[in-house]
Image (cartoon, rainbow, N blue to C red):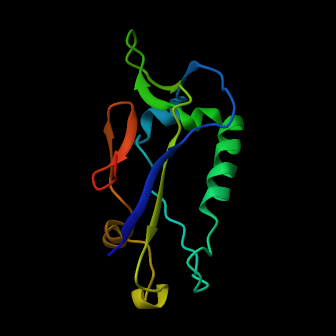
Amino acid sequence: MVEITQSTIVTPSEETPKHKIWLSNLDVVAARGYTPTIYVYPSTGRKDFFPVDALKAALAKALVVFYPLAGRLNRDPETGRPEIDCTGEGVIFFTASLDATLYDFKDFAPSEEMRKKLVPVARLRGPALCHDDAPG
């Protein structure tokens, strides 16, 4: 099973605009929520083969330009329309390890079962997105 070794919030590296953006009409009719994704990198055998800090720094820079991604989904209190509250709070970033290889999964086809095994389940807790097993 996947072992989460770190769970942090990555915030934009610079100040970002603070305002609200209504979702488009297409976004309003589509299902809303967080999109769980996973990226797999093969180990080189070295403990420090993957520069996590460099990836976080790059993400922090990208969140300056794509600042709505560092916000939160809300509803306009007057109209009830879904909106992005551009708060600059950041995005959750998990680092995990697995004592297996992709070859151990044989047919690595996307499925709900595969997602449950590999992608942490996120939930809202206070102002930030958290993971049930995450420290802090």
**Residue at 51 percent of width and 43 percent of height:** 91
Question: Outermost residue toward the front?
Answer: 47
Say left or right for 65 vs 88. right
The quarter holding residue 75 reads top left
Query: In the image, is residue 4 above or below residue 8?
Result: below
Q: Nearer the viewer, residue 55 or 17?
A: 55
Percent x, y of residue 38: 49, 64
Q: Nearer the viewer, residue 33 or 87?
A: 87
Percent x, y of residue 27: 50, 35
**Residue at 65 percent of width and 43 percent of height:** 60
Question: Outermost residue toward the left?
Answer: 132
Q: Quadrant of the N terminus?
A: bottom left
Query: In the image, is residue 19 above or below residue 39?
Result: above
Percent x, y of residue 90: 53, 38
Q: Count of labels shown?
A: 0
Q: Nearer the viewer, residue 46 or 86?
A: 46
Query: In the image, is residue 68 above or below residue 114?
Result: above
Say left or right for 116 vs 128. left
**Residue at 71 percent of width and 43 percent of height:** 61
Say left or right for 83 vs 54. left
